[in-house]
Amino acid sequence: MPIHEKSLIRPEDIKTHDELVLEVPEEELGEVAPLVVKTMEGAYELDAPLKVDAKVGRNWLDMREGYA
């Protein structure tokens, strides 16, 4: 099911430059993060693959890899 049909993206979610900042409950991270990565990587067909990384943290300083 596409991400926009699951009501997982909230109005307070924002785009910053070339990044998306999403506020997601911890219990939904395992579902939301891979879905966002898959959606973004397939958003537009390019000659080179579109690489998307997902990070999680309570603030920008605490961001860490692990959801890609």
Image (tube, rainbow, N blue to C red):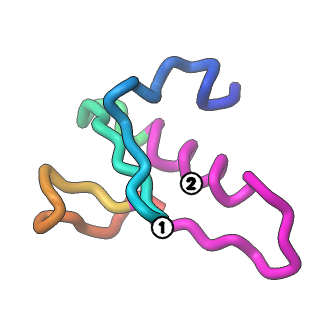
Magenta residue span: 31-54
Q: Residue furthest bottom?
A: 48
Image location (x, y in percent) of residue 6: 56, 20
How packed mark 2 is, by other alpha carbons closer than 10 Å (few <14, some 14-19, many 20 or more), is some
Numbered mark located on residue 53 in the image: 1
Amino acid at dot 1: Asp
Q: Residue at x 68, y 60 (%)?
A: 41
Q: Residue at x 35, y 42 (%)?
A: 22
Callout 2: SS: helix
Q: Which comes sooner in the sequence, label 1 or label 2?
A: 2
Amino acid at dot 2: Val
Callout 1: SS: loop
Q: Residue at x 46, y 38 (%)?
A: 32
Residue under numbered circle 2:
37
Q: Along the horizontal axis of the image, is 9 left or right of 29?
A: right
Residue 45 occupies quadrant: bottom right
Distance between the alpha carbons at the discs numbered 1 and 2: 7 Å
Instruction: Look at the numbered discs 1 and 2 and tell me whether their residues touch, using CB distance below 8 Å.
Output: yes
Q: Residue at x 35, y 32 (%)?
A: 28
Q: Is residue 37 magenta?
A: yes
Q: Is residue 42 magenta?
A: yes
Residue 4 occupies quadrant: top right
